[in-house]
């Protein structure tokens, strides 16, 4: 199934973001070989040149390395992966906070809403666990 890509943003940038997420989430482990340009292009339903451009960007950032005979691998630098993860999280959080403030929420209200949501999720999962035990 082709990846869902936003026509309003450069495709290579979306590929970079997706591969970054897959690396920092652990889908691709440090030192693991990545799919080839052609394989990834087929999966994402994009031009191989676009994948090549995304890989070049990831290589510049240090997240992946090109090995002449064995393709591309994820860096073994776990500190770089961790720092990238934190940067991505900070970007998502900044966007979330900006969106909430546009809705008129202040920092305290945002915290309250997050606490409510977290307690609901904790309560729901506890309820589901009890229901499973009773079966």
Image (tube, rainbow, N blue to C red):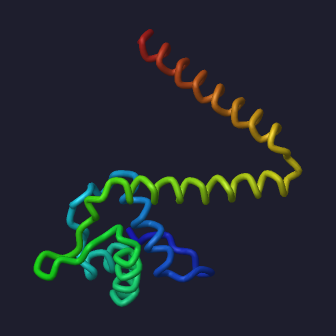
Using the rendered view, name the quadrant where residue 8 is placed. bottom right
In this rendering, would 40 be left or right of 4?
A: left
User: In the image, is residue 47 above or below residue 120?
Assistant: below
Residue drawn 35% across and 67% down? Answer: 63
Q: Nearer the viewer, residue 7 or 105?
A: 105
Instruction: Work out which residue is located at the far left of the displayed protein and give it.
Output: 69
Q: Please state, as top left, top right, bottom left or bottom right, where the N terminus lies in the image.
A: bottom left
Residue drawn 42% across and 12% down? Answer: 133
On the image, the x and y values in percent for residue 132 come to 43, 17
Instruction: Work out which residue is located at the far top of the displayed protein and give it.
Output: 134
On the image, the x and y values in percent for residue 104 come to 88, 50
On the image, the x and y values in percent for residue 23 come to 36, 59
User: In the image, is residue 108 above or below residue 124?
Assistant: below
Q: Please state, as top left, top right, bottom left or bottom right, where the C terminus lies in the image.
A: top left
In this rendering, would 42 be left or right of 24?
A: left
In this rendering, would 101 be left or right of 10?
A: right
Exactly how many numbered labels are in the figure?
A: 0
Residue drawn 34% across and 76% down? Answer: 59
On the image, the x and y values in percent for residue 20 come to 42, 64
Residue drawn 23% across and 74% down? Answer: 72
Instruction: Work out which residue is located at the far bottom of the displayed protein and give it.
Output: 49
């Amino acid at each position: 199934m082709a990846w869902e890509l936003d026509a309003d943003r450069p495709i290579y940038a979306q590929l970079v973001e997706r591969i970054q997420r897959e690396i920092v989430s652990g889908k691709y482990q440090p030192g693991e070989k990545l799919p080839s340009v052609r394989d990834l292009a087929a999966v994402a339903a994009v031009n191989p040149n676009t994948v090549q451009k995304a890989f070049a960007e990831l290589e510049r950032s240090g997240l992946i390395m090109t090995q002449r005979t064995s393709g591309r691998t994820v860096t073994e630098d776990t500190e770089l992966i961790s720092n990238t993860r934190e940067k991505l999280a900070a970007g998502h959080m900044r966007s979330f906070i900006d969106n909430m403030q546009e809705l008129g929420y202040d920092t305290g209200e945002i915290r309250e809403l997050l606490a409510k949501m977290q307690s609901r999720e904790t309560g729901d999962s506890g309820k589901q666990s009890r229901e499973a035990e009773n079966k």
